[in-house]
Image (cartoon, rainbow, N blue to C red):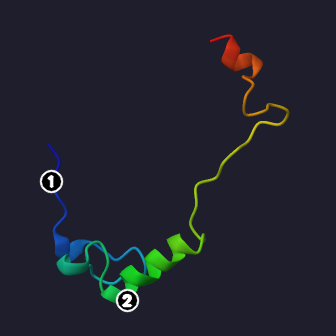
Amino acid sequence: MTAKTPAAARRCPRCGSAAIHAFRPFCSQRCRALDLARWLDGSYGVPVVEEDGADDGELSRSDRDR
């Protein structure tokens, strides 16, 4: 069983200040809003690797062999 880190010891992922329970995991409404803005404007994202040559309707050879 692992021990939980006390809320006072957690840090804001945006600025590094101590996190406040009301804005968890951030330290303030400002840091929470800045993080949301980065998600909405596309600064954060999940990389996608697309296969070349395969149409949406076709399965690639490796997919058909499964």
Q: Residue at x 17, y 48 (%)?
A: 2
Q: Residues within 10 Å of mark 1 (few under 14, many from 20)?
A: few
Q: Residue at x 69, y 14 (%)?
A: 64
Please name the amino acid that badge 1 sits on. Answer: Ala
- Nearer the N terminus, badge 2 or badge 1? 1
Q: Nearer the viewer, mark 2 or mark 1?
A: 2
Q: 7 or 43, which lies in front?
A: 43
Residue 25 spot, x, y in % from top left = 29, 72
Task: Residue type at mark 2: give it.
Answer: Arg
Q: Nearer the viewer, residue 41 or 8?
A: 41
Q: Quadrant of residue 60?
A: top right
Residue lying at the far top of the rendered structure: 65
What SS does tag 2 mark?
helix
Quadrant for the C terminus in the image: top right
x, y percent for residue 32: 37, 80
Task: Read off the residue under disc 2.
Answer: 30
**Percent x, y for residue 7?**
18, 71
Residue 40 visible? The answer is yes
Give whichever of 37, 7 is nearer the camera.
Answer: 37
Q: Is residue 20 left or right of residue 33?
A: left
Residue 60 relative to residue 45: left or right: right
- The single residue placed furthest to the right in the displayed view is 53
Report the disc number at residue 48. Answer: none
Residue 31 spot, x, y in % from top left = 39, 84
The residues bearing labels 2 and 1 have C-alpha atoms spaced at a distance of 30 Å
Task: Name the residue at 40% across, 83% down.
Answer: 33
Res 16 seen here: no
The image shows a total of numbered marks equal to 2
The residue at which mark 1 appears reads as 3
